[in-house]
Image (tube, rainbow, N blue to C red):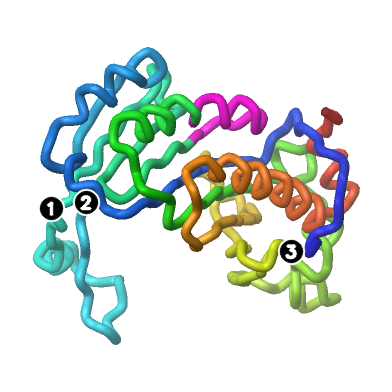
């Protein structure tokens, strides 16, 4: 709990748009001061592409909306001076980010947890061996699911038949629900271990195919912001992964579940 146990499945028509795992640690200045050549050598086989950026902070006065001229945005931009090293796979579907305060892996095409975890083990092991972080200050695993009805053969099916009423809120109401044009719900939910949480954002988004299709996004960010021993990181990540499976199946109806063609593992 709080999400009921379910059988783990892999969806042949996977709704996942992006998966991100991030481990934060106390600042390691060496990562900024020295080029991470040894780190690159350790992961270059799987992540051969490299680029370097500076993290940018945009200062916007309170009360001013973000719909402001580009010129003013540029003037408001301040470089933080923190280097962000990016290492990506040859097909650009996997990317590792390394800064003095975190390491992250993101995947554009996610198949199953075991593959993702194996990929992440390579840069995480390199980080530990080379930079020896004292501990992790935050562990996060984020899943972004985008339900595209057109790709599931459900163009004419109402969201009420695909998502649970407690997820849809007012959109599940007769007549009124069909007229909702903007939808954006946010929740912070504490997990059953008493210390981890999940931030869930549910809203309408447009399809990345630029065809104007209205899609339903479920963005779930599982995290633990307590001090965690280096050797305990994988335990917490496994815990988050299992809860992510429970959460998504808790949100959808059996009709949508079957439309995505589940295969039990």
Mark 1–mark 2 Cα distance, whole angstroms, equals 7 Å
Picture quadrant of residue 35: top left
Residue 213 placed where, x, y %? 60, 49
- Note whether residue 201 is visible: no
Q: Residue furthest bottom?
A: 63
Please report the residue visible at 68 percent of the width from the left and 48 percent of the height from the top. Answer: 239
**Residue 227 vs residue 79, the one in the foreground:** 227
Per the image, label 2 sits on a secondary structure element best described as strand
For the record, the magenta segment spans 107-120
The residue shown at (79%, 37%) is: 260
Q: Which residue in the structure is indicated by mark 3?
A: 192
Front tag of 3 and 1: 3
Q: Is residue 187 visible?
A: yes
Give the alpha-carbon distance from disc 3 to disc 1, as whole Å: 39 Å
Screen quadrant of the C terminus: top right
Say whether residue 110 is magenta. Answer: yes
**Residue at position x 36%, y 26% in the image:** 88
Residue 168 at x, y percent in the picture: 75, 68
Q: Secondary structure at mark 1?
A: strand
Tell me how many marks there are. Answer: 3
- Name above or below for residue 228 compared with residue 86: below
- Which quarter of the rendered picture does the N terminus lie within? bottom right
Task: Please tell me which residue is depicted at 68% across the width and 68% down the height of the picture.
Answer: 194
Label 3: how many Cα within 10 Å (few below 14, some 14–19, many 20+): few
Above or below for 70 versus 114: below
């Amino acid at each position: 709990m709080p999400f009921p146990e379910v059988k783990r499945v892999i969806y042949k028509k996977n709704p996942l748009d992006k998966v991100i795992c991030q481990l934060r640690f106390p600042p390691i200045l060496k990562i900024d001061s020295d080029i991470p050549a040894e780190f690159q050598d350790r992961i270059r086989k799987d992540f051969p592409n490299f680029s370097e950026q500076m993290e940018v902070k945009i200062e916007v006065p309170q009360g001013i909306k973000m719909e402001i001229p580009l010129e003013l945005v540029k003037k408001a931009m301040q470089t933080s001076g923190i280097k962000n090293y990016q290492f990506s796979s040859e097909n650009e579907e996997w990317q590792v980010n390394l800064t003095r305060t975190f390491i992250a892996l993101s995947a554009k095409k996610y198949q199953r947890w075991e593959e993702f975890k194996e990929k992440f083990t390579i840069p995480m092991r390199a980080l530990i061996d080379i930079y020896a972080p004292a501990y992790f200050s935050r562990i996060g695993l984020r899943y972004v699911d985008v339900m595209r009805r057109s790709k599931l053969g459900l163009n004419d099916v109402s969201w009420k038949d695909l998502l649970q009423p407690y997820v849809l809120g007012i959109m599940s109401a007769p007549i009124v629900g069909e007229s909702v044009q903007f939808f954006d719900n946010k929740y912070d939910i504490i997990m059953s271990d008493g210390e981890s949480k999940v931030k869930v954002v549910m809203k309408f988004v447009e399809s990345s195919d630029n065809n104007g299709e209205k899609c339903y996004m479920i963005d779930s960010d599982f995290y633990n912001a307590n001090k965690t021993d280096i050797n305990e990181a994988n335990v917490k990540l496994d815990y988050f992964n299992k809860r992510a499976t429970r959460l998504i199946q808790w949100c959808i109806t059996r009709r949508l579940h079957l439309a995505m063609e589940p295969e039990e593992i």
